[in-house]
Image (cartoon, helix red, strand yellow):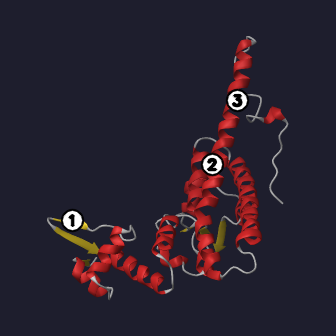
Amino acid sequence: MTEYRIDELAAAAETSVRNVRVYQERGLLAPPRRVGRTGVYTEAHLARLRLIRQMLGRGYTFATIHELIQAAGSGQELAHFLDLDQVLSAPWSDDESKHYDRSSLEALVGPLTPDQLERFHRLGLVETDGDVYHVRSQRLLDVGAKLAAAGVPLSEVMDLAEMLTAVANGVANQFFKLFYRTVASEGRSESDITESMLVMRPLAREALDAAFSLALTNESERLLERRAKQARSGVRPTLDDGTPGADDGATLTTPA
């Protein structure tokens, strides 16, 4: 990776040393690595510096650029978010897809029947191209493989994946309905909509994570209460009465 002193960085970005220092002071550009008394910058600094200049040229203020950089804190380059189409098409997580052959896939999750492979396809988790299996979410596959290794039957792992996919699809649908109804309202400029969508992206995932964490806490508390009742009644506490919270009569629904 190419390294630069501050004057070399400024020259490469076609700006001044003074501007580089201003961008650092405003929190737009990360400080350099120190080697003795010399600050050393990298290609990442150069890419960010060019991006800042591009955004300033499009009329963004320092404050707005700072907010966008903070909102894009998933490690992806902010340049991906300058246009609405790029905002929508940018990855929503650091998850990755991966290709497997049949033997390496089964080494992770166990033997797969034709019906199970077809179910993976219907869920949109696996796509097949000849003898190659394209797994769209390595994280989901890893979770499923660990559950199977812990003794959960693969059929029930797939039941869980199907339920989670349905719930996630419903939440995503509601998120975009909210976006269409409010942020993307008629009369707003596309640049305003783009900036709002950039801010909403991390909030969507944060809200879902917080809601699921709260739900897990609630279910854990219900289980503990039930076991406490059993103990007070002189009955040995068990887990044989099904899923925590099942006796509440709750049913799973997904947003329309």
Please, what secondary structure does the residue beneath circle 3 have? helix
| Residue occupied by mark 2 | 210
Measured Cα–Cα span from mark 3 to mark 2: 20 Å
- Residue 39: image quadrant is bottom left
Q: Residue 41's spot in the image, x, y percent? A: 27, 73
| Residue occupied by mark 1 | 34
Q: Check disc 2 and give the amino acid type.
A: Ala
Q: As displayed, is residue 231 above or below residue 226?
A: above
Q: Residue 176's spot in the image, x, y percent? A: 73, 68
Q: As displayed, is residue 192 above or below residue 102?
A: below
- Residue 26: image quadrant is bottom left
Measured Cα–Cα span from mark 2 to mark 1: 39 Å
- The quarter of the image holding the C terminus is bottom right
| Residue occupied by mark 3 | 223
Q: Residue 65's spot in the image, x, y percent? A: 48, 73
Measured Cα–Cα span from mark 3 to mark 1: 54 Å
List the single residue furthest toward the bottom: 14
- Apparent side of residue 242 relative to residue 128 in the rendered image (left or right): right
Within 10 Å of the Cα at label 2, are there few (<14), some (14-19), or many (20+) other Cα atoms?
A: few
Q: Check disc 1 and give the amino acid type.
A: Arg
- Residue 235: image quadrant is top right
Within 10 Å of the Cα at label 1, are there few (<14), some (14-19), or many (20+) other Cα atoms?
A: few
Q: Check disc 3 and give the amino acid type.
A: Leu
Residue 50 is tagged as none
